[in-house]
Amino acid sequence: MIDKKTIEHIAKLARLHVTEEEAHEYSIQLAKALGHFEQIAKIDTTGIEPLVTPTEIEAYWREDVVKQEFSAEEMTANAPAKAGNLFKVPPVV
């Protein structure tokens, strides 16, 4: 089980206020979660290649083709405010 001091430290880092009861419950829950990770770490994975995805998917590559589907006027047609072909936004300091 994870001690109360560690739970309080984690809560402080997360800027959370936890009661004594919550700290005790979180301690139990975190201990269970860490126990699962310990079980996973014990699995022998020698000879097993790591996967990028959980299923065998072939990479689909498409050619990068430049298209101009809309004109600048069409893109800014519904803008609430514009300056020429640009969107006009409030200044940011």
Image (spheres, rainbow, N blue to C red):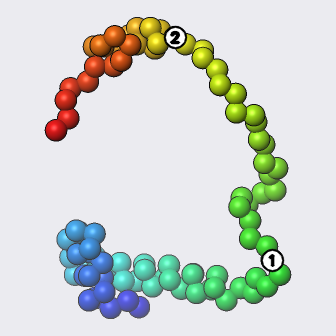
> What residue is drawn where x is 74% and y is 65%?
51
- How far across and how far down the image is residue 76, in percent? 40, 13
- How far across and how far down the image is residue 35, in percent? 54, 85
Secondary structure of residue under mark 2: loop
> What residue is drawn where x is 30% and y is 82%?
7
The residue to which callout 1 is attached is 48
- How far across and how far down the image is residue 87, in percent? 33, 19
Quarter of the image for residue 13 reads: bottom left
Quarter of the image for residue 9 reads: bottom left
Tell me how far mark 2 sits from mark 1, CA to CA: 51 Å
> What residue is drawn where x is 77% and y is 41%?
61
Residue 77 is marked as none
> What residue is drawn where x is 35% and y is 78%?
26
Secondary structure of residue under mark 1: loop
Give the amino acid at mark 1: Ile
- Mark 1 or mark 2, which is nearer the start of the sequence? 1
The residue to which callout 2 is attached is 71
Q: Quadrant of the N terminus?
A: bottom left
Report crowding for label 1: few under 14, some 14 to 19, many 20 or more residues within 10 A (C-alpha): few
Give the left or right position of residue 72, taking residue 84 as reference: right
Q: Nearer the viewer, residue 35 or 80?
A: 80
Q: Quadrant of the C terminus?
A: top left
Single out the mark in the foreground, 2 or 1.
2
